[in-house]
Amino acid sequence: MKFASTRLIAADIQAMVAFYEMVTGQRADWLAPQFAEIITPAATLAIGSAETVAVFSPGSAEPGANRTAILEFMVEDVDAVFDRLKDKVDLVHAPKLLPWGNRSVQFRDPEGTIVSLFTPFTTAAKERFGSR
């Protein structure tokens, strides 16, 4: 089995795709007017419009209803990325060191999902991610 992607369902797919293009610096690949993917070296973020839910099972997913997931992106310098984004995002917390060794900043996407950007900071965290 291969983990392929994480998909978000969006009420406003244009705003969501533009937001994640801004955050990741990657252009989305629009596979259909109601579905786009942002492909990064480690994973794919898929974004589907609310109308795609009916293709699977009506009512099975709801835009803006998530309060359990955090999308995490590892970046080379979390403070530099924070400086670039801080006036453009709904901040949850500014960069800080977390107990497991990552320096992290969190904010919300246009539909409320928390996005975490982090840089491995401690020696143990750097070893976990294969960086020194």
Image: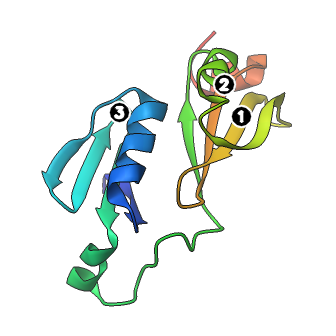
Residue 44, relative to residue 51: is it above or below? Answer: above
Tell me the number on the disc at residue 82. Answer: 2
Tell me the number on the disc at residue 105. Answer: 1
CA separation in Å, label 2 and label 1? 7 Å
Q: Earlier in the sequence, mark 2 or mark 1?
A: 2
Please give the name of the residue rendered at 40% of the width and 51% of the height, measured from the top-left corner.
15
Q: Earlier in the sequence, mark 1 or mark 3?
A: 3
Disc count in the image? 3
Q: Quadrant of the C terminus?
A: top right
Tell me the number on the disc at residue 40. Answer: 3
SS under mark 2: helix
Q: Earlier in the sequence, mark 3 or mark 2?
A: 3
Tell me the number on the disc at residue 64. Answer: none
> Residue 98, percent across and down?
82, 35
As rendered, which of 106 and 73 lies closer to the eye? 106
Q: Quadrant of residue 96?
A: top right
Please give the name of the residue rendered at 31% of the width and 41% of the height, measured from the top-left corner.
38
Few, some or many residues within 10 Å of mark 1 (<14, 14–19, 20+): many
Residue 61, relative to residue 46: is it above or below? Answer: below
CA separation in Å, label 3 and label 2? 19 Å
Q: Amino acid at mark 2?
A: Phe
CA separation in Å, label 1 and label 3? 19 Å
Quick check: 91 left or right of 53? right
Quick check: 27 left or right of 18? left
